[in-house]
Image (spheres, rainbow, N blue to C red):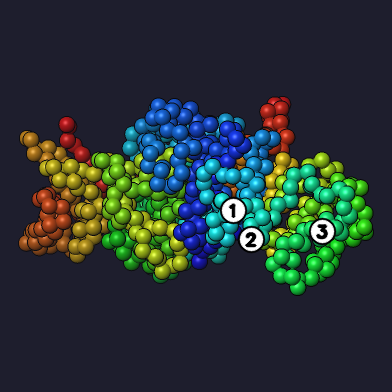
Amino acid sequence: MLKIKNLEAGYGKLKVLHKISMHISPGEIVTIIGANGAGKTTLLGAISGLLRNRSGEIFFDKQDIGSLPAEDIVFMGCSLVPEGRQVFATMTVKENLLLGAYVMHKKNRKHSAQNDLDRMYNLFPRLKEREKQLAGTLSGGEQQMLAIARALMAGPRLIMMDEPSMGLAPLIVKDIFAIIKRLREEGNTVLLVEQNAKAALGIADRGYVVETGRIILQGGAEDLLSNRDVQRAYLGRDLDSETKI
Amino acid sequence: MYWEPENECMSREDLAQLQLERLEATLNRVYMNVPFYRRKFDELKIDIDSLRSLDDLRRLPFTTKDDLRDNYPYGLFAVPLREVVRIHASSGTTGSVTVVGYTRNDLKTWSNLSARVLTAGGITKDDVVQIAFGYGLFTGGFGQHYGAERVGASVIPISSGNTARQIKIMQDFKTTALVCTPSYALLIADTVREMGINVSSLSLRYGLFGAEPWSEGMRQEIQDKLKIVATDNYGLSEVMGPGVAGECLERNGLHINEDHFLVEVIDPETLEPVRPGETGELVLTTLTKEAFPVVRFRTRDLTRLLTEPCACGRKLVRMARVMGRTDDMLIIKGVNVFPSQIEAVLFAVEGTEPHYQIIVDRKGALDDVTVLVEVSEPIFFDEMKKQNELIALIRHRLASELGISVDVKLVEKKTLERSEGKAKRVIDKRKI
């Protein structure tokens, strides 16, 4: 579904991604894990067209999207749930969702946003309860749900999420990840960028480990979880103290 | 039957993407973690970020057996020793020992790939697999053992040797599959016959043989004598062990597990890639190994790639059976001769036994080759005339195959040393 070869990207003179090659097949949850500053958000920016790539190829459904503007990429079915949710705080929950319906409306004026709204309320009953509330008054977890639902309103085939667990209490994180899992079960394809490596690998099919703009490890989620480098660097296990008696 | 159809039957396009991703990650790791590779790349001013395709791999230097020896024992490990859960050493076919290590994930991958090869050779969870490879530092025994367990077969870890006991266990335990070197399979077959056991009374159905070069004639011989389907498989400890490549039941070349090993075939003289389908030295790069990755390892094994699609449905490229090692190659009177060529001729001649030895010596300034070949008893005790006719026939066929004339001596059955592991076919007495 998504295929990236030798992607290089950055900001001004700063090169953040040195060389990234990766792919996602339909129906998969693929996670990108790495420390702060490794280039995870830059990668999502480059895929979604928010950032100009310096070199490399990005193919979405066999179409080269490397030089397309961000709105075209969304219209092709590739949506981003941005880091820090970025909901429109002064609009209601429903209005936020309807903004997400813009793509479907443009594609087909007869398309009923109500059906999509119902689907979202079914997926996130909390949003239904808070339908008329201003998004800015929601809790962090609810805002995250809203950000995901807003992205889903565009009817994407690939949904990319940037740190959905950021700043959320552990119990809420669990809810959010359960929702991501459910999205996959309903046939969605998810690219999940996370610092919470354990939670991400817990639900992902495969993963890539990024360090200083390069992929240093890739493989099945289970294999990455049992890789000692991953355990030490991202799962917070201090293996050296464990091996001492 | 496939073990991992999504990988074994993956489209070439998807495979290329996966290989590129894995190659780039492997190169990043060896550069970070193995001083040997970092130094070598830096010396050659190779920026690994500038490698952009699988073909760019050619810009990287080769790794040789000598590099492994120079870094004995742990110099090329890419992880600290505490992450290594298993250590093996090369079987020492030639020269001194080299050491390799495996992380927990490596062992998992290895079992899986070995399971692929066993499955391709006909093994299922219903089989009783007798593993008559040596267990120990040599990777043959353990590699196939874990693969067979992974498949779910009942594994008999008998190891090599004590042939009479092997056969007793084969009878009593109702072994359905034999895993060992082809030369040992032949010894077992002959011993079964000598013990007066009817082969049809055994439960044996499949044989998976590897760890030494063998010929198509030898396969026929083993299949006929043991009444089994015999497949060839390939691996080497420096790269992983058994599980690198294996034949499917089509028995027409060994499928290389390309999603884990990147394959090249080079001319051992010029070090340039050979033309597609030509014979040369196999060069392998590991794509998923954690503890002991190798980049462009020169295997010294000679083969060629078969790119036509295989009827079994696997999309993985096949390699022809290994015809020998670059260092097995004898240069006799200036002509390159492989023991496997001699074997192929001998197996095609009626009246000979599948046991032979090649003695190379120097008489004055000239190389002199004598092929000792065992013949069946009736011929040996027959009149001289028949013996001479047989010698003349073998000499003639060898001369037309090799392009040089060699001496042939017939020896009585069972005079040549039998091998329970890798057979010693060549005795080179030349002192150069």
Q: Secondary structure at mark 1?
A: loop
B58 vs B158: above or below: above
Asked whether the beta carbons under mark 1 and mark 2 sit within 8 Å of each other, the answer is: yes
A189 on left or right of B275: right
Number of residues whose C-alpha sits closer than 10 Å to that of mark 1, classed few (under 14), some (14–19) or many (20 or more): some
Residue denoted by label 3: A97
**Same chain for marks 3 and 1?**
yes
Which of the 4 quarters of the picture holds residue A125? bottom right
**Same chain for marks 1 and 2?**
yes
Residue denoted by label 1: A68
Q: Secondary structure at mark 2?
A: helix
Res. B22 in view: no
Number of residues whose C-alpha sits closer than 10 Å to that of mark 2, classed few (under 14), some (14–19) or many (20 or more): some
Viewer-nearest residue: A54 or B151: A54
Which of the 4 quarters of the picture holds residue A17? top right
Q: Secondary structure at mark 3?
A: helix
What amino acid is at disc 1?
Answer: Leu
